[in-house]
Amino acid sequence: MNDFLDRCRGTVGTNHVLTAPGDTAAFLTDWRRRFTGKALAVVKPGTVAEVAAIVRLCNEFRVPIVPQGGNTGLVLGSVPDDSGTAIVLSLTRLNRIRTVDTVNNTMTVESGCILEEVQNAAAEAGRLFPLSLAAEGSCTIGGNLSTNAGGTAVLRYGNTRELCLGLEVVTPQGEIWDGLRGLRKDNTGYDLRDLFIGAEGTLGIITAAVLKLFPQPRAQLTALAAMQTPEDALRLLTLAQGTCGAALTGFELMSDFCLKLVAKHFAQLRLPFPQNYPQYVLLELSDSESEEHANAMLESLITDALEQGVIQDAAVASSIAQSKALWNLREHIPLAQAEEGKNIKHDVSVPISRIVEFIRTTDALLQQSFPKCRMVTFGHLGDGNLHYNVSPPEDEAPDAFIARQAAINRVVHDSVHRFGGSISAEHGLGALKRDEVRLYKSEVEMKLMQTLKHALDPHGLMNPGKVIQA
Amino acid sequence: MNDFLDRCRGTVGTNHVLTAPGDTAAFLTDWRRRFTGKALAVVKPGTVAEVAAIVRLCNEFRVPIVPQGGNTGLVLGSVPDDSGTAIVLSLTRLNRIRTVDTVNNTMTVESGCILEEVQNAAAEAGRLFPLSLAAEGSCTIGGNLSTNAGGTAVLRYGNTRELCLGLEVVTPQGEIWDGLRGLRKDNTGYDLRDLFIGAEGTLGIITAAVLKLFPQPRAQLTALAAMQTPEDALRLLTLAQGTCGAALTGFELMSDFCLKLVAKHFAQLRLPFPQNYPQYVLLELSDSESEEHANAMLESLITDALEQGVIQDAAVASSIAQSKALWNLREHIPLAQAEEGKNIKHDVSVPISRIVEFIRTTDALLQQSFPKCRMVTFGHLGDGNLHYNVSPPEDEAPDAFIARQAAINRVVHDSVHRFGGSISAEHGLGALKRDEVRLYKSEVEMKLMQTLKHALDPHGLMNPGKVIQA
């Protein structure tokens, strides 16, 4: 393997082939620090041609490749296993914004660009790139594309898949596919783009993308509504879709218990209501017209919802600071849960029409098998996507509870499956859910996936052990 | 082959295996009546299980399959070649609306449903299914999905691909893949859905789909604006996107020559202006609020555009009849062109920012090589998609001109390629553009497509000769 590493050094420069433990450590441990793998080296090409050359070298030496962006994934998709046979191929040096086209409303960016830099480049051109998620300061757009990331504006703008028009990809054979087309319509053959999006680097390496841009909204409003039940939250959703149309950008459900945890661990964050309610919804509106128009629309929604008894109270942010404060409540839920101690997370989706029944049924099943476990249920209700997390009972040792993770996953995921849902709504499969998903996908679907994997990556070198066991 | 046909009859019933020329004729000739193929039989299964059984039979006897919906395609994608070795597998008996879910905003339909029936079923449930195109009274949703159809509302709602959440597909091996998930978010593996969408039946047979529904708009407005140049049309587009946001549903460019042809052949259709202008744009707005709000938005757009000298005149439809009259102008362009005599059609797209330069450059190139040819340029400017059609010079025999079609295509498609465009924006490749596209796609892309085709359909039985030469 020394020969291999020497040729890697010859390709990307000695400085960009890391082997010293101090240099490689950050690339080998996952974001949630649950797993540390091993690698021959971390290789950091600086151009697409160098990526292709490294992949060809890996083919020659049959060295597996783990592509990596910001390494912020939650399902062990971007770290190597512990065999030490693979290289980590870090895309972070491919970080140029290649072009911004404000008439076509597109920008072409390299995959190592940090999401926040992409957002900023769009904003500087007077446009909006709407993908937004908690890790945006560290995650790369290549990782967002490879996992088809969701985030907080899916309701209005779609997942990352819907925000991409074209790709540049290095194939498992080390060839460069230039599919960087900035077209809204192109029906000239198979949809290669969407095959690479969401494939978590197992079918090729995304090196650049053409992204969709949007006009910047003239007004953005945030409100918090309080209600009795998840049913009421769903009624509010239908009402809001009818009243606000495409202006409805975000619709986040949070249970009272979620916000009690936030209050316990972050005392400075306060609910804007004089009393507590069982459920809350955080609403975000983006309006193309004006502040006044957005306010009138939101006021009319709230008035209707109060009159119809759908909600009990509502608070509208009247400044950016107030809006941030409301979003802080939402974004501190996972942090508060972490402060509270170990817990078991699920990133699930079900058809929106079944979400209420899903919550009720699954809560009951869990209480039956794991009495007094505490449900931390929140998420993107408007997309049917819940972060359905389970904390240990207050009087139980967390480690004993966590040891039962597999059994808890089984109850939740079986229930998701019965409701026609997905056990990974926005995080992907990685190595973490690779085997779990086989319990729920049909043999036909698994076979189709295997066929594609074998056809495109016959030597099984691309991110092995992720998504699918080759 | 008698044994094969007997077993087909045993599977779907004697009545549903057509072999008499009088019965099969309509299935063998394409919509524009340019080609008539031959087939062993037309087989019409009534259920998904029957589709799968017929595909398994075809595998056993190595009989090629041409899946067919409404047979309204424009690129010879749904008719067999003249070898007479294939069956036409008509999906028209699979025409049930399986479910409509107004809370999840989805409907599950079988692929043989006529698009208009799908629209109507959505409307009856108080929802909008926004796909709309000229053939909607005859085309099937399965054909729309298989060609990723575009239409008149792509600007707001996307192509058919963006309107579909899940599929049921019979694989080339005759297995049924149940991917009928009604989820907005599902990141559990490769995107099989988008691989089958737009594959024109060459990778499998779509038998059912979960479609997205939307709230019905409270107001719909149509306006016609007159301007000097395509540049002005583009300036109006940017202005309209800023002013109307997601309310902007349609944005259709038409040259004066297009409307002169309409006036010549359909004297009852009149322009609402006292004089002619070089270019026109048909605008469609859909508003979630109210008629008054939509009117105010449109009025403000028109006032700004007039003040900035972007447009010279504008007419707003004040009734459904007037709106229909404006759309009639647009929809009669292809009919008027047909009345005028034979012509050469191109369905192309380029990045919106380059569309003006594309028109000017390509017009000049054509006039150089084919002096006095007449450009019938119209289309979905908001999507970068032009129907860039060429009629013979008035003083030239049409047949002599049409004989030069290949040379004309070459000039147009070479130009499209130089501008980073697509030679099939919304019609697909079929047999008609299968070889043409090879001139413009890279070897890497063609190889990727071949790899997928061979992997999924190793015997090359699925719609052979379409999209790709296996």
Image (cartoon, coloured by chain):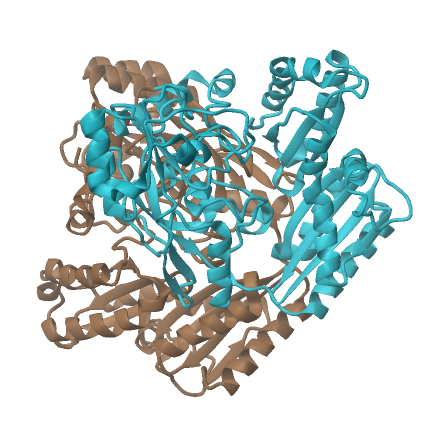
Chain colours: A cyan, B brown
Q: Residue at image x 74%, y 53%? A: A325
Q: Which quadrant is home to the C terminus of chain B?
A: top left
In the rendered structure, the answer to whether residue B50 lies left or right of residue B33 reads: right
Indicate whether B41 appears above or below B430: above
Point out residue A253 in the picture as x, y percentages from the top left corner.
72, 40
Residue drawn at (55%, 64%), measured in percent from left and top? Answer: A216
Across the whole image, how many numbered discs are drawn on residues? 0
Q: Nearer the viewer, residue A316 or B424?
A: A316
What residue is rendered at 33% in x and 31% in y? A41
Near-viewer residue (B85 or A400): A400
Q: Of residues B301 and A249, which is closer to you in this image?
A: A249
Q: In x, y percent, where is residue A370?
A: 74, 14
Q: Is residue B207 above or below residue A15?
A: above
Image: A17 above or below A95:
above
Whether residue A191 is visible: no
Q: Quadrant of residue A418?
A: top right
| In this rendering, position of residue B52 left or right of residue B315 | left
Q: Quadrant of the N terminus of chain B?
A: top left
Is residue A383 something that shows in the picture? yes
Please state the horizontal and vertical placement of residue A75, each as a whole percent of the image.
51, 29
* In front of the other: A49 or B147: A49
Give how far across and how far down residue A277 sits, in percent: 86, 40
Left or right relative to B21: residue B94: right
